[in-house]
Image (spheres, rainbow, N blue to C red):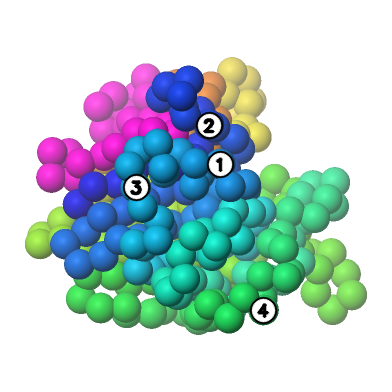
Amino acid sequence: MKIWTLIENTSCDEGFACEHGLSLYVETKHHKILFDAGQSPAFAENARKLGIDLSEVDIAILSHGHYDHGGGLQRFLELNQTAPVLVSRYAFEPHFNAVNRNIGLDDALRDCGRLVYVDEELAIDEELTLYACNERERTHDMLTCGLNTFRDGVHIPEDFRHEQYLLIREGETRVLLSGCSHKGILNIAGWFEPDVLIGGFHFMKLDADGRDADFIRRAADTLLSYPTRYYTGHCTGQAQFALLKSIMGDRLAGIAAGDCIDISKNT
């Protein structure tokens, strides 16, 4: 299994575009998968530079309903005429940031004819399963950072019921993809205890040099308690990543646009 970062906040080379967003391309024994589509068509241009033909993708997945993960979806639909797009049933609910700016998906995408709505769990085949984990106990706090939704006429704190995670099984290896880990990276790592976890940790709003440093250190210790190798970026934050890395060492690595992870060499 190989996983390419098509778009992320940083790039491994100036020849690749970067933006606040995330898009991953995965090749397994049986599938070619697009996991998220960044906030613009830039992910597709990076894919072209990497020699990746997005028209050959057989399944696309949006991890949640935020613009920086689904903003490039229209471009994917133009390039690929057949792949279904798996989204949470709640993905198109209203989503806002801390100052109530809309950060949701383009509502016009509802009518693209390619969406497959997912509830709590979907076993795609023996290799792929999607999980929402809305019914699982959250023993660690979520970091909502002011993110909210609009239900019954009022703004309420997000419960992130629109977020889902992709578990990929290859032989004895279990790889989990998580877009932003809004339900709490510590919860998610504990629920699955995968061999490899790739995704954002949503720590970017934490003060890594001050009041939140101890929280980040404790988070690193908790993550190390699981038998998992982690790859992270996007919403983790660079200062936050540096502090995690100082504790987690080679159990943690960063991702950047243009990178490729060969799972067989990293487990």
CA gap, disc 1 and disc 4: 23 Å
Residue at the spot x=73%, y=70% of the render?
108
Image depth: mark 2 or mark 3 in front: 3
Identify residue for label 1: 42
Is residue 225 rendered to the left or right of residue 203?
left
Identify residue for label 2: 17
CA gap, disc 3 and disc 4: 27 Å
> What segment is highlighted magenta in the picture?
243-267
Q: Amino acid at mark 3?
A: Ile
Identify the mark nearer the N-term, 2 or 3. Answer: 2
Q: Is residue 117 magenta?
A: no
Would you identify the image quadrant in which residue 203 lies? top right
Is residue 229 rendered to the left or right of residue 86?
left
The x, y position of residue 15, in whole percent, is 46, 24
- Identify the secondary structure beneath mark 1: helix
CA gap, disc 1 and disc 3: 14 Å
Residue at the spot x=52%, y=24% of the render?
238
CA gap, disc 4 and disc 2: 29 Å
Identify the mark nearer the N-term, 1 or 3. Answer: 1
Would you identify the image quadrant in which residue 55 lies? bottom left
Identify residue for label 4: 111
Residues packed near mark 1 inside 10 Å, few (<14), some (14 to 19) or many (20 plus): some
Identify the mark nearer the N-term, 2 or 1. Answer: 2
Depth order, front residue of 218/168 = 168
